[in-house]
Image (spheres, grey):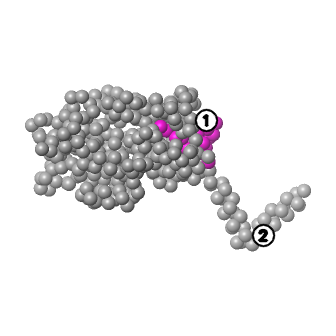
Amino acid sequence: MATSVVFRSTRAFLLPRQSFQKRFQRCQMNYLAPRRTLSSYLVTPSELAEALKRSPPSPISSEPRVVPVCASWFLPNDERKGIEVFREKRIPKARFFDLDKVIDKRSPYPHMLPSAKTFAEAMSSLGIRKDDTVVVYDSKETGIFSAPRAGWTFRVFGHSKVHVLNNFKIWVEEGFPTESGELYNVECNPYPIPKLDETQVASFEQVREVALDYNKEGAEGVQILDARPHGRFTGKDPEPREGLSSGHMPGSINIPFSSVLDPVTKAFLPKDQLKKLFEEKGVDPSRPIISTCGTGVTAVVIDTALEEAGYGSPETRRVYDGSWTEWAQRVNPSDSLIRKDE
């Protein structure tokens, strides 16, 4: 028997070099297939469906998994609630990321980034592991709205394997599987306390300095892109939060988040159309960019569109976490930092 084993092994290694290499490559491809990662930050429904087949979010698997995460959220003046649409229809085995709870609860402003400890606790309660590939998505009604904010939150806390589904509306229309019902228990996993990447976040003080320097000689020339609807930007329409002044920051550029989405599918526009839009709005890709909105949610829709278009450097793009809700409550009237169009 020993001779027989040696003989078979010898024959394998005596295969012609080209034949052996082909066999080795085929074996290597078969071994690596389950570990393939999604190729870009935005993923299509078909890409996600295929990834979930290869690496489902099984609690018994010790391998890195693909975990769908619903991050549906609606404005305060909207009667819908994210958790309700999650119960109504979701991707099977999805988790729910609550943008109203995974926050800095000590802050008077909504949706401010949580502490690193709070983020880690949220990940643990959702059963998400550090090596999991997370794909966040919105409700089918909104298409793209709050999921990019959730994805950005994962990123700033160092969870690099995160993607945004483009989008759940298309997922449903193309007949990919869904489920409904109450939340189910998931197995909690230890999640290491991460470190916040402050280079991706703009503070009130930093944005105020940019606004005060607008049109001054020698200023750095940071561009502020505002994702709110045009009426709120000009000051003609009210903010959805009662008592909050509308208007805009000096020198800011209004790019309503809906303008980077297809009006029918509500998915992100193709890269060439996004690039053309930013060019028409006068955005200079060579200068730093800060994206803002009402509470830091749809600002990340703009930031994601910039990334998808390859417009500007990721190292010089930031999101104003507090956005207009913080801005309108903290600026001094004497500074004239809230502008309205006549």
Q: Position of residue 5 (x, y in %)?
A: 85, 59
| Outermost residue, left side | 334
Residue bounds of the magenta highlight: 54-70
Label 1: which secondary element: loop
Q: CA distance from mark 1 to mark 2?
A: 44 Å
Pick the residue in front: 341 or 152: 341
* Between discs 1 and 2, the one toward the N terminus: 2
Residue at left offset 12%, top offset 44%: 342
Q: Would you say residue 64 is visible in this rendering?
A: no
Q: Residue at x 20, y 54 (%)?
A: 221
Callout 2 crowding tier (Cα within 10 Å): few <14, some 14–19, many ≥20: few
303 vs 266, nearest the viewer: 266
Name the amino acid type tagged 1. Pro
Q: Which mark is residue 59?
A: 1
The answer to whether 150 is drawn above or below residue 314 in the figure is above
| Residue 268 shows up from this direction | yes
- Point out residue 125 in the picture as x, y percentages from the top left corner: 50, 30
Image quadrant assignment for residue 78? top left
- Badge 1 density bin: few <14, some 14–19, many ≥20, Cα 10 Å: some
- The quarter of the picture where residue 141 lies is top left
Instruction: Please tell me in which quadrant of the rendered image residue 298 appears.
Output: top left
**Where residue 146 sits in the image (x, y, percent)?**
39, 40
Q: Position of residue 299 (x, y in %)?
A: 32, 44
Q: Secondary structure at mark 2?
A: loop
Give the amino acid at mark 2. Answer: Leu
Q: Is residue 41 left or right of residue 201?
A: right
Q: Which residue is mark 2?
A: 14
* Drawn side of residue 113 relative to residue 212, left or right: right
In the shown orientation, is residue 279 left or right of residue 208? right
Q: Residue most toward the right?
A: 1
